[in-house]
Image (cartoon, helix red, strand yellow):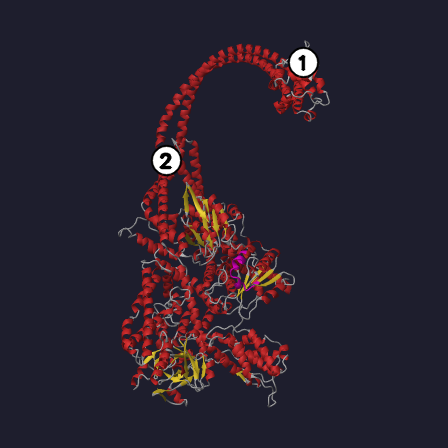
Amino acid sequence: FPPPAAARYLADEGRHVYLTPKSYLEMLGLYRTVLIRRRRENTTATVRLENGISRLRDAASSVGTLEKELTTMVQAADEKRELSESIAARVASEKMTVELETDKANEEAAKVAAIQAEVQRQNEDAERDLLAAEPAIKAATAALDTLDRRDLGSCKTMATPPKGVGDVFSAVCVLLAGVNQGIIVQRNGKVKDKDRSWEACKKSLLGNVNGLVDELKNFKALIDKDCIPKVNFQEVRPYLALEHFNEDAMKKKNSAAAGLVGWVKSIVDYYDIWLDVEPKRLKVVESTLQLEAANSELALVRERVDELQGRLGRLTAEYEKADKDKREAVNTAERGQLKLELAQRLINALGSEEVRWVEGVGRLQHEREPLVGDALVAAAFISYCGPFNKAFRDHLLYASYIPYLQVAVAGNPIPMRELGEGVSIVSIIASEAEVAGWNAEGLPRDLVSIENGAIVTSSKRWPLIIDPQLQGVAWIKSRQSSRVHVQRLGQPKLLAGLRTAIAGGTSILIENMGERVDAILLPILRRAILKKGGRALIAIGDDEIDYSSDFELFLHTKLSNPHYPPELQAELTLVNFTVTPPGLEDQLLSLVIRKERPDLAARKAAVIHQGNEFKIRIKQLEDDILVKLSTAEGDITEDRTLIEGLESAKQQSLDATARLEEGRDITKSINLTAERYREVAKRGATVFFLMNSLHRIHTYYIYSLNAFVVLFQHGIDLVHDAERKAKVARKPKTMLSKLKAATSKIIQMQRFNWNEDLLHQSSLAGEQDISTLSTQLLQKKSIEEKGDLSDLEFQKRCTHLATSITTVLFKYMERGFFARDRLTVVVLLSFAISQASDNINIAQLSRLLSPLEAVEPAGMADDVASWLPGRAWARLKGLEDGAVDTLGVMELSDLGDQLTSGSEEWRAWYKHPEPETQHLPGSSKELSGLPFLLVLRAMRTDRIPAALQNYVGKHLGTSFSNPQSFSMLDVYMESSASTPVFFVLFPGVDPTPWVESLGLGFDISVQKSTLKNISMGQGQEAPAEACLDRMAKQGGWIMLQNIQLMESWLPKLERKLELASEAAAMNFRCFLSAEPPPLSHMYNIPESLLQTCIKVANEAPADLRSNLQRAWSCFSQEHLDACNHTSEYRRCLFGLCFFHAIILGRRRFGQQGWSRQYGFNTGDLKICADVLMSYMNKAQESADGQGISVPWDDLRYIFGEIMYGGHITDFWDRRTNVTYLKALFNEQLLRPGGQLAPGLSLPDTILDYPGYSAHIDGALPAESPVLFGLHPNAEVGYLTSTAEQILGLVVRLRRGASAGSSAPGHATDNGVHGIVDSLEKRLPKRPKLSSVQEKARPLLAGPSAPYVVVAMQEVVQMNFLGEEIARSLGELRKGLNGQLNMSQQMEDLSSGLALNEVPGRNPFHSISWEKLAWPSRKKLDDWFDDLEERAKQLISWEVKLELPISLWLALFNPTAFLTAIQQVSARTRNLPLDNMTIETNATIHHRPEELEVLADKRPPDGAFIHGLHMQGARWMEIEEASTEGTKAVKKICGVSCGGVVTESQAKELLARMPVLYVKAVLVDANWEPTSIGHLRPDAYNCPCYYTSFRGPTYVFLATLDTQEPAFKWVLAGVALLLSTD
C-alpha cells in the first residue's frame, strides 16, 4: 500500500502499520502462488465442464443409432436360441448314462475311503504312541550330551571303580551285547558275569571311547529296526532296580557313570514304549495292502466313467458354445436396450446442465485472461490490507490498487475483472462454498470477518489476528478443532508443543500474545527452513527438527491496539478481527431476537446453519458430477452405476437447491419481523463502539465484548422482569428478602470462559433449533403477544428496550469513570445515539466542536465592543458564514445585526451567570439544541459544560445528566466468579470498608476465613496466589490491593483469574485495587485484565463543602475534649480544617490554583491537628487574662513550611500556601462571629462536634472562586478550559470513530498534504548566521555587546528550528508521495499535523519542533503565527543589531535578555553585576508605536518590552487610576509610568499589559533575597510565566504597583504571561 495509508491510519485510528521491502517480496511470492493456483483451478474446471458437455452430447447423438441397431440384435438372438435348445436335448440323454456309471464309481470310492480312514486311524494311533516315547529319547540324548569323552577315557585308568560305577558299565555292556563286537555273548544271547566285570567292560567298552559314544547314539535307531535282542533288556532290568543306579548318586562318584545311568534308564523306557507300538505298526502294513487292492479296483471303474465324461464333455462344450452365442446375442440386445435407457436417463438427468456448463466454460475462458490482475489484487489485499479496518481496505482497493493497475503498463491497464456487482475481493480469493464453510465453522457473517477469513486461509505468512472480541480465535479453534494445540507465550510446554506440531504436521495456536515475541520463535515466524540431505529442517534453539509442510501456526492477541515493530510485521500477516459496527449490529439483532422471539431465533439459526451446509453440499455434488464424468472410462452410457450415481447426485443437488431457496424464503420472512428490532441492535452497537473508543480518554476505560453482551442481555431481561412484575401483586420485603432478591438478580451469566465468544455462541443453531425447523414443534405461546402489538406499541417497546440497554451499559461504564471524564463520555453517548438515529445535524455538531472565526470580521458597534470580547465577535461572524446553506439555521445568518440592534438584551444575556438557562434575545429566542449551543460556544464557552449537561438531560434523561450514587450492592449484583471488581484508588478513598460491609450481608468475613485482604508488595506474590487458588476452589472473597506495584506479576495474576473464570466456585469473588497511572495514556495494568473487570472509580467529592465535611470527620468529640483549652482548640481546629478544604478545593482552578499537582491528604491534617493540640496544651495564659497566648507564627511555619509545605516544590505555590495561613490561621479564629472567609462567619458560641458539622451545612455559602480568594473569572477560566477539554476529546474520539465507518479518502490525505503545503509556504526566511556574525564582530566590544549576544543566540536558535521544520516537512512530503518509506517520525509528524498539534506536544512522539522552540500551549496554526512574528522581529533586529525600541519578550530565552539589561547597565554605570536586579514599571503607553515620541527611545539602564498579559487581575490604566485617587504619572529615568494592579473586568481572562519599562537597579537592603529574586515589601511581587501552564515556564519576577494588600493578588493567583493560549 502507499505509505500515506499508514500515516492516515495512524492519525485516524492510532494504529501502527509498516511496509518493508520484505513485505513487498512476500507479496510477490504470494502473487505467483495465487496466480498458479487460480490458473490451475481455472484449467481444471474448464476441462471438467468441457468433458461433461462432450459426454452429454455423445449420449444425445447415440440415442438414434441405438434404436436402429437394437432390432437387428433381437433377431440374431432368436436364431441362436433355437440352435442352443436342440443341442441341449442330446446333452440331457448322454448325461443320464454318465450319471449311472458315476454312481457305481462313487460306491467303490466310498469303500476305498472307509479302508483309507481305518488305515489313517491306525497310523495316527501308532504315531501317537511313538510320540509318548519322545521324552525318553530326549532324556537319553541329553544324558549322552553330558558325557565327556575325556571322562570316559579317564575311567580306563581306574583299577577299581567307585561302588556302583561298575554296575553302570555292566548294564551298558549287557545292552550293547550283540551290537558291540567286543562284548562276548553266549549262545542264548546273554553275557556271563565275568564278561561283565570291570576289567571286561574296560576292555570291551573303553577300548574305543569314540566308538562307544557312537554306538550309544545309534542305539535308538537299532531299536526302531528291531535289531536289539530282547534278552539284553531282560538282563539289564536287575541293574535298574539297584538303589544306587541313578544320576544323583553317580554324579557324586563319576560324571561319566552319571551320564550312562541316564542313558540306560531312558533307552529302556523307550524300548518298553516301542514294544507296545510295534503290533500296531504291523496292523497298519496289513491295512495298507488292502487299501492298494481297493484302489486298483476303483481305478478301473473311474476309467469307464472318464470315458463317458469325455463324450459328455464334448457334447456339453458344443452346447455351451451354442448357449454362449445365444447369451451374447441376448446380452447384446439387452445392453443395447440398457445403453439406450441409460443414455436417455443421463440426458434427462443432466441435460439441463449443458446450458449452464456451456455458460460456465465461457465464463471461465473469459476469466482466464483477467487472472493476472485478479491474482495481483488478491495478493496485495492479502499481504497488505489485513491490519486495516473496512474503510481503509476499500480505500486501498478502489482508490489505490485498481487505479494504479489501470495504468500500470505504460499507461495501459493490467487485465483484471472489475469489482462490483457479483465480483468482490472475497469472490476473487475464495468460492461461495468456502465462505459458507467458514460461516458454518463459526466465522461471523459480516463482510469484514469474511475478508479476514480469506486473508487467514490464503496468506503464505503466519497470521497474527488482532482480536479483542475473541470472534476470530473462536473460528480458528472451531476450524482447526481436530488438529490444533492451544499454547501461550511463557508456558513451559510451548517449545515441546511446537516441536511436536512442526514434526507431526499439526497446528499451533498461540493465544493472548503481548507486543513482544520470544527470540526463539523467530526462525518459525520467518519460516527459516533448512534443506539437508533431502530433509526439510528448522532450528528451534540449538535443535534442528524435521519440518512438515502440513504444519500451521496461528498467533492471536486480545490487545485492542498492539504496536508490533516493522521487522515483526514483515514476517507475519496482521489481520484486524476487531468487530465492525455492521457486523456487531447484525449479531446483536440475532441476540435480541433470541431474547424477544426465541421461536424466530431458533428457526433463523437453523435456516442459516442448514443454508451453509446446503451451499457446501451443492458445491460438493456439482464437483462430484463433473469429476465422475471426467474420470469415467469408455462409453459412460454402459456404466449403470455411474449413471445412477449421477442421477442421485443431481437429485440431491436439486433437493439441496430447493431447500436452500426455501430457507431463503423463510429467512426473508423472519427478517421482516427481525428488522423491526433493528433499532435495539443499532443502539447496542452504538454504545459498544463508544465504549471501545474510551481507552483514548484513559487506559482504564477498556471493556470486553463478553462483558458488553452480558449487560446487553441484562438490559433486555430487566424489561421482561418489569413486565412479569406488573402482573404479580407486590408483597412487603424484609431485609433478608431484599438480600435474597439481590442475589437472585445477579446477572445469570455466573461463569464464562474469558476466551469464549459469548455473542457468537448465542447465534449458533442447536440440535433443538434444527429439529424445530423440520418438525415445527416449537410453539410461540405467550411470546406471540409481542407479534400482536400495533406499530406504535411496537415502537414504544423497542424504545423501552433500547433505553433499558443504554441505561444498564452506561451505569456499568459510569461506575468506572473519573469524575472529570463523566460529562465527556455522556456527551459522546448523546451525540452517538442521536447520530445513529439520524436525529442530529452533523454540520451543526462539527461547527460546535470546531468553531470557525471570521478572518476579517466586520467592525463591532462601540456599544457591543464595550462588553463583548473581539474573539467572541469573530466567532459570531463565523457562524453567519454558511448559516443557511451549511448549518440550516436562518436565525444565525444575521447574528451581528441582532447584537447591534439589541445590544442591551444581548448584554444582559451575556452577563447572566447562567445564560444556558435563558432564551436567546430577539429573533433567536426559539433556538434550542445544537443551534443554541453554537451561539453559547461563541459567546460564553465557560457555560458549555453546564449547557451540555442540560442537553444530555433533555435527550437521554436526568439519570444520564446527573451522577448516580455509588452502591456496592449494585456492583456485586453485576459481578460473578468470572468477573473481578477493580477499584481505582484516590487520595482519601479506601474501598476496603465497602467490601467488608457488603461481605457481612452475605456472611462473608475475615473472621470466618472467607474474606482475605492482601496489600501487595515485595514477597506477597506467593501468598496471594495460594489464597486465590484456595478461595477459587472453596468459595470466598479475596481482595488484592495496590496491584500496580506488581506490574511484572500481573500477567500471572491474569492467568490465574482466567482459569478461575472457568472452574471457580459460584461464590468466589476477586476484588482488585490500584492507583491510576500518572498520565491517562499510560498503562500500569494489562489491557486484557482490565477488559474483564468491573471498574469502580468512586472519587471523593471535590467541592468545598465535601472537603470541609471530610476534613472535620477525621476527628471526634473525644478528640475535641482531649485538649486542655478545648474552646480555643475547637476554633483553631475548625480554622485548620477550613484551610485544608481550601487548598484542596483550589486544585480545580488548574494552574491558577496550584501551578503543580500536590498530594495534600488527611494525614497532613491529622498531624497538624496533633501539633496544634500539643502547642495548645502548653500554651500560657495571655497577658490580658482574656484567654491563652497562641504561638501563631510557630504554628503557621510548621503547617505552611513543613507539613503542607513539604509537598510543595514551587516557590510561588509555597507563597500562596503561607499566605492562606496568614489570612485564615490567626487571632480572628478566637473571636466569636469573626469572618473566616467571604460569606462564612465563625460560630458565635462554643460548639460541640455535631454543632460544627451543622455549622458547615448551614453557614457555608455557595461555592465560588471568591471563597478561595480568586476572582470570579477564575471559574470562567476553569470552565472555559473544561469546555475546551471536553469538546477537544469529543473531536478526537469522534474523528477516530468516523474514520472507522467512512472512507479515509482524499480528505485526510489531502488535509495532511495541504497542511504541509501551507506550512512550507509560511515558513519564514531564516537569517544568515554568517552575515549576523560579521555584523556583530565590531559591536561585541561596545556597551551593547550583551544585546548583540542575545540577538545572535536567538538567530542560531531560530535557524535550528527553521531547519528542523523544513527538513521534517520535506521528508513527510516525500513519504506521502511514496518516495520514502514512512518512518515513525513521519507518522508522528503526520498525526500531529492532522490534529493541529505542534509536533512534540505529545510526549510519546519521536519528532519534536517544540523542544527547539519556546514553551507554548497554542494550536499549530496560532503557534506558526507566533513563529512568523518572532522571525519578523528577529530579522528587523539583526539588520543593524540595534536593540528594538520595544522588544516582544517572547524570545527563545527571555531570561538571557533580562540578564543582558543588567550587564549593559552595570558596564555603563560601572556597578557590580552580582548586586543588581531588575524592576518593572508599567508605562502609560499601550502600544510600542507610541514610544516613537520619546526623546530617549532606548534608556541606558533598561529597555522597553511589550506583548505581556495579566491573569487573575488587570492593570488599571493611568486615566482610571487618576479617577480612583491613585497617584498620577511618575517619571522613572524620564519614562512616564503609572497605574496599579486592580480587579479584572468580568469575563476578561487575560488583560493586556501596557508597554513595560524593565530597568536594572541595585539591590536594596530591605529587599528579601529568595531563589527567584529579591522580594520587595512595597510592591506586588508578580511571577511572570511564559504560558498559563505556569510551573516550569517561569521566567522572571516583576514588580508591580498596587493599592490593595499584596496578599490579595497572591491568593488570586495573579501572574504575567508572555503568551496567550
Q: Confirm whether the magenta stretch covers residue 726.
A: no
Q: Which residue is disc 1 drawn over?
A: 230
Quadrant of residue 580 within the rendered picture: bottom left
**Residue 1014 x, y percent position in the rendering:** 59, 63
The label nearer to you, 2 versus 1, is 1
Vertically, is 94 above or below 745? above
Under circle 1, the secondary element is: helix
Between 931 and 1179, the one lying in front of the other is 1179
Does residue 1044 belong to the magenta stretch?
yes
For the point 34% across and 88% down, the residue is: 1534
- 797 or 1125, which lies in front? 1125
Residue 1172 visible in the displayed image: yes
Specify whether residue 609 is in view: no
Mark 1 burial class by Cα count in 10 Å: few <14, some 14-19, many 20+: few
The vertical placement of 920 against 194, above or below, is: below
The disc placed on residue 56 is 2
Q: Indicate the secondary structure of the residue bearing disc 2.
A: helix
* Bounds of the magenta segment: 1040-1055
Q: Quadrant of residue 1180?
A: bottom right
Magenta: main secondary structure equals helix
Give the residue type at disc 1. Lys
Residue type (three-letter) at the residue carrying disc 2: Leu
